[in-house]
Amino acid sequence: MSAILLIVVPLLAAFVSILFKKASSYILLIVSFASVVTLNYVPLEVINIGGFTAPYGINLVLDNYSLIGLYIVDSMFFLVIALNCIKFKKLSTILLVSLAGLNGLLLTGDLFNLFVFLEVSGIAAYLITTTNKKPLATFNYLVAGTVGSSLYLFGLIILYGMFGTLNMADMANEIAISGVSANALAFPFLLMFIGLGVEAKLLPFNSWAKGILLSANKLTGPMIASVYAGATLFVFGRILTTLFIYSDQLVLVLSVILIVGIIAGETMAFSSKKIRGVLLYSSIAQASLIVMLFVLGITGWATMMIIVNIVSKFIMFSIASHTNDVLGTDEIEDVQGMFLNNKTIGVAFTVAALNISGLPLFFGFIVKMNMLTDLFAKDGYFLAAVILITSVIEGIYYMRLILKLWFTDKIAPKIKFEFSFQYVVTILAVLLIVFGLYASPVIALNDEVEDTIVYEGGIQ
């Protein structure tokens, strides 16, 4: 069994779903579940497409890093679909194309092919966000995404002109043996960084995010803030770690952008009056932190932080979006005490919030403590101080939010959550606690990422 099926099958299923519209939601559900199951049977390998070996042909790279990304992204994608496929069955074809695009992003070993999958998954995302019924916000997302992908392509063209290859591993080899100065590479690398930064919601390239996520429904909230954001950050990690050569000037520019993003994101989350606003701005800060860790070479714990964010934001955005769908608002003052009538949901949300805050007993605590240890080992005292300070801010606004949602002196709002949804978020919350108490698998997974983030053995 080959990993290429993760791209081919969803694309073929998308065409089939057009012919059998009444069964399209079931096709989507089956294919998204099959993608997760398939990951148990595909070997780690480099797949050459069309019989042409790299660097002349297009290849897919399935190593431990991309396998981890596929497991977490495809699993969260399946959960989003399982909870929403009936209500949004008209989007089944689009969601199948989205799945193919996201899998392609995580598998491709070719920079131009990466651009193609960015476009495929991006177009699907624009169509998914139309369900928010905010056409101006979707249009802004489309424009921002188009500009971002164009900047990425421009940077790629410059690199191709310099090295004559589009294969990531081959280009990394060419950069290493060419002796070209890091300063000469700073401009194309910065263009590619900005291009990917648009989809990753990095400040100041995320002007689209507010319009989309502050009006997100049960589908777009977890899909864009969790699944899409996670896939983009995994791609970021691959490129930043295996391809980028950092000049002092580039490190300075990226550090300023990312540290400002961390501080500004946490500050805006602290002042937000909506649940989805808190989650949006927290996501901006966390994305900036993850990318900063990749820049510094702390790849393992950056990857673990992606997992922390994907799972936590799936739980919280799903709950917040459903709350808004039912009550017509997610203003914190208007939904005070909502967990009194929904204790299972309240516990899951609380666990996810405490997990992302990095408090003890949770998966996020293990990740954050080890991340800080690695930063101190690399003499990254300033960033460690920023993380500690912003973590305090983060802990304060999440605790404030949790208390307001658990307690009220008014009549607590009543919201009905389906049993299937309660079951899913409960299982995820339990896993966050289990891996917080039993850290050995987390440590082992971190070590695997550290060993395999680079292409083993070069081009195959």
Image (cartoon, helix red, strand yellow):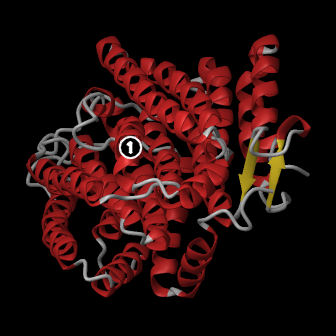
Q: Looking at the image, is 106 positioned above or below residue 195?
A: below
Q: Nearer the viewer, residue 162 or 256?
A: 162
Residue 276 in percent (x, y) is at 27, 41
Residue at position x 16%, y 53% in the image: 260
User: In the figure, residue 423 lies in which quadrant?
Assistant: bottom right
The residue type indicated by label 1 comes to Phe
Residue 349 pos. (x, y %): 35, 59
Residue 84 appearing in the image = no
The reply to whether residue 271 is visible in this rendering is yes
- Is 166 situated left or right of 1 in this image? left
Residue 358, how many percent across, how many down?
31, 73
Determine which quarter of the picture holds residue 213. top left
Which of 377 and 412 lies nearest the eye of the viewer?
Answer: 377
Judge left or right: residue 350 versus residue 297.
left
17 vs 262, left or right, is right
Q: Which residue is label 1 attached to?
A: 193
Q: Nearer the viewer, residue 62 or 379?
A: 379
Pick the front one: 195 or 325: 195
Q: Is residue 263 above or below residue 328?
A: below
Q: Quadrant of residue 154?
A: top left
Q: Residue furthest front?
A: 179
Q: Residues within 10 Å of mark 1 (few under 14, many from 20)?
A: many
Answer above or below: position of 407 versus 333.
Answer: below
Residue plotted at (16% across, 74% down): 382
